[in-house]
Image: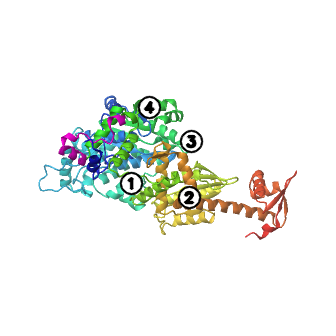
Amino acid sequence: MSNHRQIQKLLAPIPNPFLLDRVDSPWQESFYDVPDINRTASTRCQESIEAIQKGNQSRGLILHGEPGSGKTHLLQRLRLSTQKDPRTWFIYVPPFPGPGRFWRHLLECFFYDICQRSKLPDVLGKGLPGEATKEEGPGQGPLTQIEEALTRHLMNKPLASTQELARWWVDICKKDHPGEALFRRLQRTFDYLTVQFRLDPDVMKVLRHYLTWHHRSCAYAYLLGRDLPDDDLALLGVKQSLDEETRAREAVLTFCRLTGPIFTIILAFDQIEGLQLTLEDLDGLRAFANNVVDLMGQCPNLLILSAVQTYFLDTLKKSMHVAYYDRIAQDESILTTLTRESAKRLIEFRLNNQKEIVDLQQQDAKRGQLWPFTWEVIDQIVPPEGLPARDLIRRARHRFDELKKEIKIPPPRSVGEAISQHWNELFEKQLQQPEVRLNEGVYEDGLLRLLQTKPPKGWRVHRGWERDIHVLLEGQNEKMGISVSNSENMTSLARHLGRLQTMISSGKVNRLIFLRDARLPIKPTATVTQQRLQDLVQKGMQVLRPPAEAYAALNVLRELWNKAAENDLIIGDSSMSMGQLKSWLVEKTPRSLQELIDVCQGVTISALDELIDKLIETLKGQWMVLLEDAAQKMAVPETELAQLVIEKPEVAGLLAGPPMVLFLNPEAVNRT
C-alpha cells in the first residue's frame, strides 16, 4: 500500500507495537524475542552451563555490552530457557545493599525465586478427571521449583519428568494429609538428605515445614531471612533466625547443595555498578568478589553470571585480586548492537506479533508489510558500528505514532521536571506493593546514598565500620551513628540495643539515631528491650520511626541510583546521568526523604548546642580560662575547641598566646 492516507486510516485503531522498549527484570512476563539477535551471547551462556554439567565445577561468566544493547533482555531469555530444562534454576540478584549484607540479600533473592511456580503450569491439566486445578494447597496446582527439586530426592528419580513428579506428589498428599502428618512422614528422608549433602539441620527442618504446608507462612518468613519472634521460632522448632550473615550463608549453601550434582543453578548478579557509592568506593565490589568465589569453591553446580556495562570492566578488575577476577570472568558473553539486517528483523518481528496488523495483511495479501520505516530509512539510521535495540524501538514507536497522526509533541520539560514526574510514578507504584519483609538494608543503603548526596552541614557521611552502626556521620569533634533494626524478635532487639549501650559507653560514637520502621511495634511486655531503649534515650539517642512513605521513597531512590550507575536511567526518551540525578535530589528532595534529612540535621544541631552549653558552663563565673584547661575539662581536642570559638564569636572569644586564652561573651550567659 503506497497511499499515505490509506496507511493512516488502517493504522489508526491499532495499538503501537513498539511501546515496550526495555526489560526491567528477567521475571517480567511480557517477552519479545528475535532469537538471531545476540544469538552468540546466548550460545555462550548455554555453553557455560553445559561445561558445569560436564565438568562438575562452578564457573564464572561476565555478560557485558553497551547501554541499551539488551543485557536484561538476554537474562530474561536465559531465564525462560530454563523452562525447557527442569533441572536448572535461575536466580536473579539485584545489587545487595552493603558489603555486610551480601548473604542475607542473596538468601532472600534465592528463596523467593525458587518458590516460584513450576516451569510447566499445566502439568496437572490432564489425567485427573473430575478434579479442578487449584492454586492453593500441596498437591493442587503446579509444583514450585524448590518442591520439584525435593520431590526428585523423595522419589529417588533425579531424571523424572516434571509431570511425573507432580503426579507422584499428588499421591503422597492423598496418603498423608498436608500438615503434621505429612511433616512427620518426611522426617526420615529429610534427615538422610541433611547428612548426605552436609546441609544445615535447622534450615532443612523449616524447609520440611514449608514443603508440607505445616506452619507454612512462618516457614516462608524464616527462609527469607526475617528475624522472627520467639513464639514463631518455637513453632518451627528452631532457636535462631537467619538474620545474621553467617547463618544466611549456611542457608544459601544448603539450597545450593540440596539440588544435587545434576542441577545447575544460575545466579545472575545484575547492575554490579550499583555497588559503588562513589567512584573511589570499592568495598561492595570486593565483598561481591570474595563471597561469590567462596560460594563457587563450596558448591560445584553454580554459574555465577555478572552482568555489567562494558565500560565498567576496568573498575571491576581493579577492585579485586587478579585470581578472583579470573575466576569470575572465566567465561565471557558479549552483547552486540544491531546491524542493519538485525534491525529489520526486529521491526518485522514486532509487526508480525501484533494481531491487528497481521489481520490487516491477511485481509489483503497485496498490502505486504506495513512498515513504520522503509528499508532505506533503516539503512540510514543504523550506522556501520550498529545501533542499540532500545534506540531503534524508540524511533519506531515515534514513527508509528506519526503514521497514525497520534504523535503529540509534549511541551519541553526540564531535567528536574522529568525526574520529578518519573519519581512520583514509581513512588505511587511502590506504595501499592505488599511488603513481605521490611528490609533493613533498604534503610541502610538508601540513607547512606541520600546523606552522602545531601549531608548535614559540616558533617561527612560514611558507611558504618562498627557492627550495628550502619551509617556514620563525622563532624569536627563528634561521631554520630545511625543504627537500623527491624527485628520482630524482642530478644534479638534487646541484644542489639545492649550493643549500642556498650558503644556509647566506650566512646566509639558520641550520639546515636536509632531507626525502626513505624509499622513494627516494640512490645510493652518486652521489659529488657524497653529498659535499654529508655536508657539510651536518656543518654541522648534519637529514636526515628519512619512511615511507609519513607521506606517506599528509599526503595525508589535505590532503583534510580542503580540504573544511573550503569548509565541506564532512561526517562521518556532521555538518558539521565548520575550527576543529574544527584542535582535533582539536592534541589528538589522529595518530602518523605527531606524529613529523614531534617531529623539527622536536627540531631547534629542538638549535638553542637550541647557542646556550646558545655563551653558556657566551663567559662561561666571565671570569664577567662586557658584554652588548654578548658579543652581538658570538656574532653575535646584543643584545635577543635579553638575552631568552635572562631565559628561562634557570639559565645566566646579567643586571645592569641602563648598561652591561648578563652573569654566568655557576656551575652551568651542569657542564651536560651
Of pointers 2 and 1, the one earlier in the residue sequence: 1
Q: Are marks 2 and 1 in contact (CB under 8 Å)?
A: no
Q: In the image, 655: left or right of 556?
A: right
Q: In the displayed structure, would residue 505 be above or below residue 157?
A: below
Q: Which residue position holds label 3? A: 281
Task: Find the magenta span and give its range.
Answer: 355-378
Question: Whole-percent x and y of residue 447?
Answer: 54, 54
Q: Amino acid at mark 4?
A: Ala
How packed is label 3: few (under 14 Cα within 10 Å), some, or many (20 or more)?
Answer: few
Of pointers 2 and 3, the one earlier in the residue sequence: 3
From mark 4 to mark 2, how far is it between C-alphas?
43 Å
From mark 1 to mark 3, how far is it between C-alphas?
33 Å
Q: Amino acid at mark 1?
A: Tyr
Dot in front, 2 or 3: 3
Q: Which residue position holds label 2? A: 498
Dot in front, 1 or 3: 3
Residue 227 visible within the image: no
Q: Amino acid at mark 3?
A: Asp
How packed is label 1: few (under 14 Cα within 10 Å), some, or many (20 or more)?
Answer: many
Q: Amino acid at mark 2?
A: Gly
Q: Secondary structure at mark 4?
A: loop
From mark 2 to mark 1, how far is it between C-alphas?
24 Å
Q: In the displayed structure, would residue 640 be above or below residue 162?
A: below
**Mark number, residue 222:** 1
Q: Secondary structure at mark 1?
A: helix
